[in-house]
Amino acid sequence: MPAKCQQMEYRMNTDNPFDPGVSVIVGANVREVRKALGWNQMTLGQKAGLRQSSISAIERGERCPSLERLLDLARAFGVAPARLLMVPTGTGGEGAG
């Protein structure tokens, strides 16, 4: 039986406030790629086989997509799945401390 995403979700390191969780990273990347393509959430949902409400929750970091859904999103965008998992530049804590 697959584990729920919330049980396996990467938790924010409280020692580093610049270290976002996986669901936040994926959500930001989904939003960035979607907007770069000029798509709204409904269009992405249709192309990826997801509801608009699911896309919205993913983009807000409230829902962590399963690996299967992550692959659906990557296919819809025409990008490698790794693109949706990339930590955005400037969030690694440079200059902190």
Image (cartoon, rainbow, N blue to C red):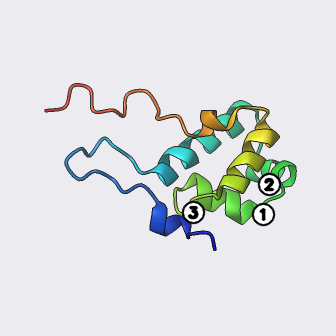
Query: Going from the N terminus, do you reach mark 3 or mark 1 first?
Result: 1
Residue carrying label 3: 63
**For the residue marked with disc 3, what is the amino acid?**
Arg
| Mark pair 3, 2: CA separation | 15 Å
Query: Going from the N terminus, do you reach mark 3 or mark 2 first?
Result: 2
Marks 3 & 1, CB-CB < 8 Å contact: no
Local crowd at mark 2 within 10 Å, few (<14), some, or many (≥20)? many
Between disc 3 and disc 2, the foreground one is 3
Q: Is residue 45 left or right of residue 27?
A: right
Residue 69 in the image: above or below residue 5? above
**For the residue marked with disc 1, what is the amino acid?**
Arg
| Residue at x-position 66% and y-position 53% | 67
Query: Going from the N terminus, do you reach mark 2 or mark 1 first?
Result: 2
Percent across and percent down for residue 63 are 57, 63
Percent across and percent down for residue 2 are 62, 69
Percent across and percent down for residue 80 are 70, 32
Residue carrying label 2: 45
Local crowd at mark 3 within 10 Å, few (<14), some, or many (≥20)? some
Which one is nearer the viewer's eye here, 49 or 8?
8
State the quadrant of the C terminus: top left
Q: Residue furthest front?
A: 1
Q: Secondary structure at mark 3?
A: loop
**For the residue marked with disc 2, what is the amino acid?**
Gly
Marks 2 & 1, CB-CB < 8 Å contact: yes
| Residue at x-position 79% and y-position 60% | 50
Q: Is residue 15 left or right of residue 3?
A: left
Q: Residue furthest bottom?
A: 1
The dot on residue 51 is: 1
Local crowd at mark 1 within 10 Å, few (<14), some, or many (≥20)? some
